[in-house]
Image (cartoon, rainbow, N blue to C red):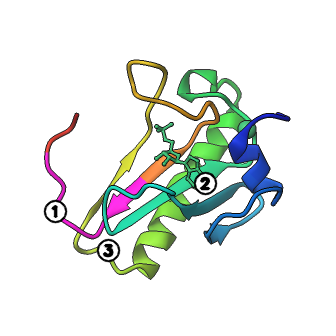
Amino acid sequence: MNDCIFCKIINKEIPSKIVFENDKVIAFEDLAPVAPIHILIVPKKHLASAVDLNSEEDFEYVKEVYKAAKVIATEMEISESGFRIVNNCGEDGGQTVKHIHFHLIGGRKLEGMA
Ligand code: AMP
Ligand code: ZN
């Protein structure tokens, strides 16, 4: 997608602080962190949101997201203390970037849900 900011990050057209990358996902620091650790894990296929996951191949990306989350959390030493993985979907879900992504948030005690 030409005008998608996360596709541009995937294609290295705009900079980001990448912490993990393989052929299926890229993970980089969120520009506006809400916790000491706030990473965005983004499938390399442009899918607008969770409701646009259709094929088995699409769902394979979600699996890769969780595998990456485990690696990153372990590297950042929060796999024991705990963390949160959040996917905002659609307007009421608070999604602002229309390329599916998962927030990995940790490094402090998280409260509440919304
Ligand atoms: P969401 O509200 O779930 O769509 O989350 C979008 C997230 O992307 C927000 O937490 C933003 O701070 C973050 N974000 C937007 N643009 C960038 C960027 N260029 N680099 C890193 N994070 C970004
Ligand atoms: Zn995109």
Q: Are marks 1 and 3 in contact (CB under 8 Å)?
A: no
Circle 2 Cα neighbour tier, 10 Å, few/some/many (<14 / 14–19 / ≥20):
some
Q: Secondary structure at mark 3?
A: loop
Q: What amino acid does circle 2 point to?
A: Glu
Residues drawn in magenta: 104-111
Q: Nearer the viewer, residue 109 or 74?
A: 109
Which quarter of the rendered picture does the N terminus lie within?
A: top right
Residue, disc 1 = 109
Q: Nearer the viewer, residue 83 or 61?
A: 83
Q: Nearer the viewer, residue 79 or 103?
A: 103
Q: What amino acid does circle 1 point to?
A: Lys
User: What is the spatial separation of the Cα atoms under label 2 and label 1, in whole angstroms?
Assistant: 26 Å
Q: Position of residue 24 (x, y in %)?
A: 72, 54
In this picture, residue 108 sits left or right of residue 32: left
Residue 62, placed above or below residue 93: below
User: What is the spatial separation of the Cα atoms under label 2 and label 3, in whole angstroms?
Assistant: 19 Å
In the image, what residue occupies the spot 41% across and 79% down? 76
In the image, what residue occupies the spot 31% across and 62% down? 35
Q: Main secondary structure of the magenta part?
A: loop
